[in-house]
Image (tube, rainbow, N blue to C red):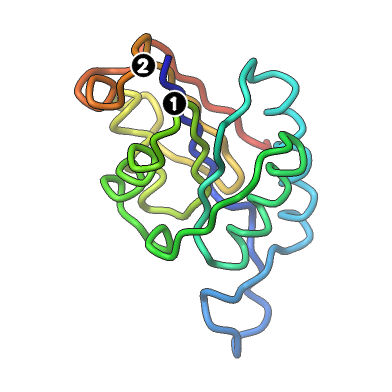
Amino acid sequence: MIRLALVRHAKSDWGDSSLDDHDRPLNERGLADAPRMAAAFAESAGWRPAVILSSTALRARTTATFFSEATRVAVEEQEELYGAGASRILNAAVESRAAWVMVVGHDPGMTALAERLSGGGIARMPTCAVATFSWSTDEWAIATAVDPDEWNLDTPR
């Protein structure tokens, strides 16, 4: 079985305009939502990723760390996930060669991929949303060619 979890980073802080976008931290709400969503995923998903792939942006890395702590799975940072589009996000999961993968990244790529994989059922990935998809195959080549058997969206609100 192939499983994919897409996590949009938690709410970030826009208060310091001198910071580069890549270096923006999570704000208070993000620091509350991320551990709560990570714990909920770990408790209710019914599976644990083999790998967590994350954008190198601070807000994504911090979000990924909460999911790493909740699932006890290491985070692999990938520079190309910063601002990645839907195809690049999916390719990162495929290239990981793991059957169960979590990717933590940014919009608009996360929403575009979630919308595509859900057949339009997911129109928006709010901050710290977790979209999960599963296919009844062990091959990514097949999974990427067909619709998932199941999908789910969990949001912090």
Residue occupied by mark 2: 138
Badge 1 local density, few (<14 within 10 Å), some, or many (20+)? some
Q: Earlier in the sequence, mark 2 or mark 1?
A: 1
Q: Which residue extends farthest left?
A: 145
Badge 2 local density, few (<14 within 10 Å), some, or many (20+)? some
State the SS at label 1. Answer: loop
Q: Which residue extends farthest bottom?
A: 18
Assess whether mark 1 and mark 2 are in contact (beta carbons under 8 angstroms): yes
- Image coordinates of residue 19 in percent, x first then y, are 60, 85
Q: Is residue 113 above or below residue 30?
A: above
- Image coordinates of residue 108 in percent, x first then y, are 37, 53
Q: Quadrant of residue 148?
A: top left
What's the residue at 37%, 24% (across, down)? Answer: 121
- Image coordinates of residue 117 in percent, x first then y, are 32, 28
Give the quadrant of the C terminus. Answer: top right
State the SS at label 2. Answer: loop
Q: Is residue 136 above or below residue 10?
A: above
Q: Amino acid type of disc 1?
A: Ala
Instruction: Report the front residue among 90 and 119.
Output: 90
Question: Spatial distance from mark 2 to mark 1, Cα to Cα?
Answer: 7 Å
What's the residue at 58%, 52% (across, down)? Answer: 9
Q: Amino acid type of disc 2?
A: Asp
What's the residue at 49%, 38% (across, down)? Answer: 6
Question: With 75 as the anchor, is 39 left or right in this view?
Answer: right
What's the residue at 54%, 42% (across, down)? Answer: 7
Question: With 83 as the anchor, is 152 left or right in this view?
Answer: right
Instruction: Report the front residue among 94 and 109.
Output: 94
Residue occupied by mark 1: 99
Question: With 145 as the anchor, is 91 left or right in this view?
Answer: right
Give the quadrant of the N terminus. Answer: top left
User: How many numbered markers are drawn?
Assistant: 2
In the rendering, which numbered label is found on residue 34?
none
